[in-house]
Image (tube, helix red, strand yellow):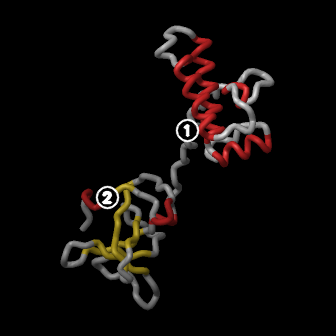
Amino acid sequence: MFSKADLKPCGGGRGGRAGCGKPVRWTKTEAGSLLGVNPAPDPNGNTAVWRDVTGVLRSRRVTPEHPLAPWERLMMPHVATCKPAARKPPPPPPPQPPRARPAAGATFYAVLGVDRDVDQAGLKTAYRRLARQLHPDVNPGDEAAAERFKAVTEAYAILSDPAKRRIYNLTGRAPRPGR
């Protein structure tokens, strides 16, 4: 009546729950939904399982009004015995690279060498001038120039965005990433 081909691993079901991974026989209930039953017949079970003429495993609940028929096997629904495997915690996020910071006491305006009331065009001019001087392709092997280039780039990224510049002017700190 049953074959090893009927066995499939427990996948937990709906709702994103993890399954235990043990072998289960998936049957179709009278309502048309899937029900997993344990692979071996169980005298304590409450579900009758049989194979219909088309070869599909069917199941129904055994009641006093509808007792077990001779062609049916009494099985235990798998949900009654399923103990999902413990989930592994998600891996920690990768560490963020340290952000280049201006020297102690220096503001982003000082890093770019501009006044606080500079317009976008003056900001862009100052950034391009410093970028041409400090770019790592122009100064290969000079770590100090590379660090200063990073600081200049961060200062320009904050001050060229009006929303980030407003937050920086109000707080004196760069806005958190993602804002």
Provide residue 51's location: percent of width, then percent of height. 26, 74
Q: Quadrant of residue 89?
A: top right
Q: Is residue 38 left or right of residue 101?
A: left
User: What residue is shown at x 62% (from left), y 12% (from top)?
Assistant: 144
Q: Is residue 73 left or right of residue 110?
A: left
Residue 110 versus residue 95: which sits nearer the camera?
110
The type of residue carrying mark 2 is Leu
The type of residue carrying mark 1 is Pro
- Can you tell which mark lies on residue 7? 2
In the depicted structure, whether residue 177 falls above or below residue 144? below
Helix or strand or loop: what does disc 2 sit on?
strand
> Dot 2, crowdedness within 10 Å: few (<14), some or many (≥20)?
some
- Can you tell which mark lies on residue 41? none
Provide residue 123's location: percent of width, then percent of height. 63, 34
Residue 18 versus residue 90: which sits nearer the camera?
90
Residue 67 versus residue 156: which sits nearer the camera?
156
> Dot 1, crowdedness within 10 Å: few (<14), some or many (≥20)?
few
| CA gap, disc 2 and disc 1 | 32 Å
Q: Quadrant of residue 119?
A: top right
Helix or strand or loop: what does disc 1 sit on?
loop
User: What residue is shown at x 46% (from left), y 88% (from top)?
Assistant: 64
- Can you tell which mark lies on residue 91? 1
User: What residue is shown at x 54% (from left), y 43% (from top)?
Assistant: 88
Q: Between tags 2 and 1, which lies in front?
A: 1
**Image quadrant where one finds the N terminus:** bottom left
> What count of labels does the image hold?
2
In the depicted structure, whether residue 170 falls above or below residue 115? below
User: What residue is shown at x 43% (from left), y 80% (from top)?
Assistant: 61
Provide residue 109's location: percent of width, then percent of height. 72, 31
